[in-house]
Image: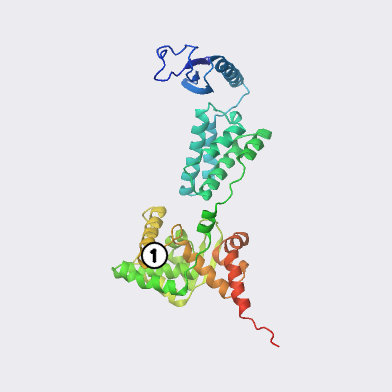
């Protein structure tokens, strides 16, 4: 049998208050709070007022809310999963879709932050969530400086709201989150920054200087050659399998998009990749025993060190610059966006959005070389 929750007003006295010994004293100007028990847990909630009468009104509203929730919970046909339970069910569904461990960590982190924020406001069921909660939770993301980070967090939270909430209430919450405009700093950071041929030559010349071990230097050089030639993302390159290089062609399925990629490899690159496997029976750049995320992180660390030594490192841009360099080369060779999307394993829409400025510059360069009529 459920024990009825009783809401009580009490005072949190300031240190200088002469009535600090009595938490039910009505006459001082200290903050008024309410408390109650729910499911065996004690909850405290600020009323936002220093007036006892107003605090009692808020306590009455909360009492009605709790009574309605408990009565509904007692009904035999009621099925009201808590926000915490709904999050776990949502995570089970996402995991069944095959999301990566990195995506799982980010998603769970965002949802736990949301649940803790709501719990502090005594919101225990999805139907308790208000538009004010959505607006103020979003406003609390002060430590997430990047607009891209905030956009991803909002995407994850909105996905949960679609799953857990119902009807008009769901749409109201979704609308309350609004949009997040990409900041100029993020726009500049995400802008393609391909290496010039001179920069690429300088970077490759730095490899044996930064990595004095000849085997290590050969593997780093091969990794750069591979990424610049194929435009593969770092996570796909690190986990590249030897069987994917059969017959001098690259055949992979993108880990991010799931799209198949097939490319013809330069014979020299094909030989180089098979030569640096260092005896590993399956992978070119990975030992296959460590976590793929850890292996990728170690390669990223090596690349950053190399770029710093060569004076070519740009904050916020690392291995993706090799992908940008590949696209810049293809655009210069006259490849279409459709062809480039197929080479990258991406959609045409994504490629056009990300590389529009680069394509425009290449078009200007080509148009500048066209003959002009003279008089």
Identify the residue at the far right of this view. Answer: 375
Residue 148 in the image: x percent, y percent? 53, 50
Q: How many marks?
A: 1
313 relative to 269, above or below: above
Which quarter of the image is occupied by the C terminus? bottom right
Q: Is residue 334 visible?
A: no
110 relative to 366, above or below: above
Provide the residue designation for mark 1.
Answer: 307
Residue 146 located left or right of residue 211: right
Residue 174 in the image: x percent, y percent? 63, 39
330 relative to 351, above or below: below
Colour mode?
Answer: rainbow
Q: Is residue 327 visible?
A: yes
Q: Which sits in the foreground, 330 or 82?
A: 330
Residue depicted at x 47% and y 11%: 25
Residue 26 in the image: x percent, y percent? 50, 12
Q: Secondary structure at mark 1?
A: helix
Residue 61 in the image: x percent, y percent? 60, 19
**Category of crowding for the residue at label 1, using alpha-carbon neighbours closer than 10 angstroms: few (below 14), some (14–19), many (at least 20):** some
Q: Which sits in the foreground, 287 or 167?
A: 167
In the rendered image, which quarter is residue 64 located in? Answer: top right
Residue depicted at x 52% and y 40%: 92
Identify the residue at the far bottom of this view. Answer: 375
């Amino acid at each position: 049998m459920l024990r009825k929750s009783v809401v009580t007003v009490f005072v949190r006295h300031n240190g200088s208050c002469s009535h600090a010994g009595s938490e039910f004293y009505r006459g001082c100007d200290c903050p008024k709070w309410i408390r109650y028990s729910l499911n065996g847990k004690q909850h405290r909630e600020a009323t936002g007022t220093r007036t006892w009468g107003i605090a009692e009104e808020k306590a009455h509203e909360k009492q009605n809310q709790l009574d309605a929730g408990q009565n509904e919970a007692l009904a035999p046909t009621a099925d009201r999963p808590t926000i915490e339970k709904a999050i776990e069910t949502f995570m089970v569904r996402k995991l069944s879709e095959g999301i990566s461990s990195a995506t799982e960590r980010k998603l769970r982190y965002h949802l736990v932050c949301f649940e803790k924020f709501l719990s502090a406001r005594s919101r225990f069921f999805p139907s308790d969530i208000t538009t004010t909660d959505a607006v103020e939770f979003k406003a609390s993301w002060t430590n997430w400086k990047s607009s891209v980070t905030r956009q991803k967090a909002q995407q994850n939270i909105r996905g949960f709201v679609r799953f857990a909430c119902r009807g008009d209430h769901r749409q109201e919450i979704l609308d309350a989150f609004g949009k997040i405009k990409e900041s100029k700093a993020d726009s500049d950071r995400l802008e393609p920054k391909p290496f010039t041929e001179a920069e690429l030559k300088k970077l490759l010349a730095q490899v044996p200087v930064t990595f004095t071990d000849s085997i290590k230097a050969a593997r780093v050089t091969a990794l750069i050659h591979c990424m610049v030639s194929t435009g593969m993302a770092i996570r796909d390159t690190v986990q590249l399998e030897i069987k994917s290089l059969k017959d001098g062609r690259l055949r992979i399925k993108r880990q991010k998009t799931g799209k198949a990629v097939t490319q013809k490899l330069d014979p020299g690159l094909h030989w180089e990749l098979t030569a640096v496997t260092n005896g590993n029976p399956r992978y070119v750049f990975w030992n296959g025993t460590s976590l793929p995320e850890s292996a990728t992180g170690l390669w990223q660390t090596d690349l950053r060190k190399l770029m710093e030594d060569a004076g070519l490192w740009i904050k916020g841009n690392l291995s993706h610059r090799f992908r940008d360099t590949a696209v810049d080369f293809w655009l210069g060779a006259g490849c279409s966006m459709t062809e480039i999307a197929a080479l990258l394993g991406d959609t045409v829409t994504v490629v056009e959005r990300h590389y529009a400025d680069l394509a425009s510059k290449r078009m200007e360069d080509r148009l500048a070389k066209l003959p002009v009529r003279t008089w």
